[in-house]
Amino acid sequence: MPNKAVHGLISRMLVGNDCSATHKVMDMPYKIYQSRHRKLFHDPLSAVVLGFLTNGYDGVVAGLSHILADYLVTESKRIMRKYGRCKG
């Protein structure tokens, strides 16, 4: 999972603001659920609502990019475990 610095960097590149409040709220369940925290707040509707409530329209973009970044990192790790590193 990308850390909050990576999420903030992506948000700054997309909207010019790190939207730290959006990322913090989306990852709050981590304290209780640890690696399974994405069962809460990591769907498009939750990302849009939480993003808008915390950082307005910038937060909407940040919330959706948060989900995408988490998904890409998780899937790349899964693929690496399954197929190993590319040789070449």
Image (cartoon, grey):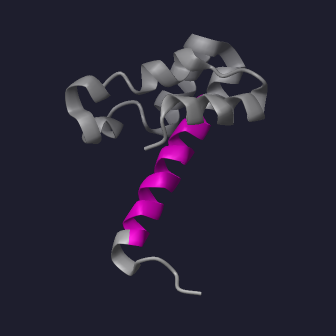
The total number of labels drawn is 0
Q: Position of residue 69 (x, y in %)?
A: 55, 45
Closest to the observer, 44 or 81 = 81
Residue lying at 38% horizontally and 65% vertically, measured from the top left: 78
Q: Is residue 24 left or right of residue 31?
A: right
The rendered magenta stretch, by its main secondary structure, is classed as helix
Q: Quadrant of the C terminus?
A: bottom right
Closest to the observer, 80 or 58 = 80
Q: Which residue of the protein is positioned furthest toward the bottom in this rendering?
A: 88
Q: Quadrant of the N terminus?
A: top left
Q: Position of residue 7 (x, y in %)?
A: 57, 33
Residue lying at 31% horizontally and 39% vertically, measured from the top left: 39
Q: Is residue 81 left or right of residue 76?
A: left
Q: Position of residue 42 (x, y in %)?
A: 43, 37
Residue lying at 48% horizontally and 53% vertically, measured from the top left: 73
Q: Is residue 12 above or below residue 79?
A: above
Q: What span is in magenta?
A: 63-80
Q: Is residue 55 left or right of residue 41?
A: right
Q: Position of residue 34 (x, y in %)?
A: 25, 35
72 magenta-colored: yes
Q: Is residue 77 left or right of residue 5?
A: left
Q: Is residue 17 above or below residue 65?
A: above
70 magenta-colored: yes
Q: Which residue of the protein is positioned furthest toward the front in this rendering?
A: 88
Residue lying at 63% horizontally and 22% vertically, measured from the top left: 59
Q: Is residue 2 above or below residue 58?
A: below
Task: Kindly indicate the quadrant of the structure image that contains residue 36.
Answer: top left
